Amino acid sequence: MEQPVISLRGATASLGSRPVLRGVDLAVHRGEVVALLGANGSGKSTAVRAVVGQVPLTGGELELFGTPRRRFRDWSRVGYVPQRTTAASGVPATVREVVSAGRLARTGLGPTRKADREAVTKALELVGMADRIKDSVNALSGGQHQRVLIARALAGEPELLIMDEPMAGVDLASQEVLAKALREEVARGATVLLVLHELGPLEPLIDRAVVLRDGCVVHDGPPPQAVGQHALPGHDHVHPHADPAAEPIRTGLLS
């Protein structure tokens, strides 16, 4: 089988003295869209931050595109959308400037080329923000901020797109726009790992769901089906693959 794009084996990580990942195995293959689900505190965000090098592993192995993480340098192949903060953290910047930063892994600090400008414009068109390219990011709503952060990642034309709760706090219209943008990325062959609180408009795109609980993988397979009572906010979802004697898996999918 082809080498996974992301391979975590026996991954452990701690925040301070608190163990957060406890032996996570996760493989994401080329062209897959994988959703990482789980309750708050289950280790979802820590797992993706470990993949992009923001949280050091205390044990286990991580490879990106078949290369051990410590030797991996080709970050232009990876686009990362962190949990939403303000796009410029109070620094006055235009939408164009923020999204152009997504090209730096490809261009370094060299002059902006036509290809860079076109990639920035295309990324903003994908998220429905091309008409705001000259605006200050400080003038944007929360949903618009999120679109700009996603455009910044897309501008680098990554092979692997990692997104941490891209739909959190985003209105339904923006969710639909982002789902459409993601569909286009998948169509061009991108591999996607998403941390999600609920599947929402992205559900048709998801190939596999990996559910974490207390830093361990408790499900890796088809996305949990949310129908009837399961669709109600706060309903604990008991996955059919779970051990019936075990406590319910609190996926955070719908809570």
Image (tube, grey):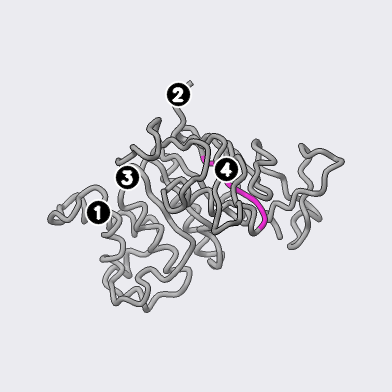
Please determine whether, in this image, residue 1 is positioned above or below residue 103: above
Q: Nearer the viewer, residue 44 or 175?
A: 44
First of labels 1, 3 by sequence position: 3
Tag of residue 75: 3
Q: Is residue 91 left or right of residue 172?
A: left
Mark 2 surroundings: few (<14), some (14-19) or many (≥20) residues within 10 A: few
Task: Name the residue that disc number 1 marks.
Answer: 104
Q: Kindly report the distance in space between the C-alpha atoms of the residues bearing marks 4 and 2.
A: 20 Å
Task: Name the residue that disc number 2 marks.
Answer: 2
Q: Residue furthest left?
A: 111
Main SS, magenta region, reads: strand
First of labels 3, 2 by sequence position: 2
Which residue sits at x=46%, y=45%? 51
First of labels 4, 1 by sequence position: 1
Tag of residue 206: 4
Q: Amino acid at mark 1?
A: Leu
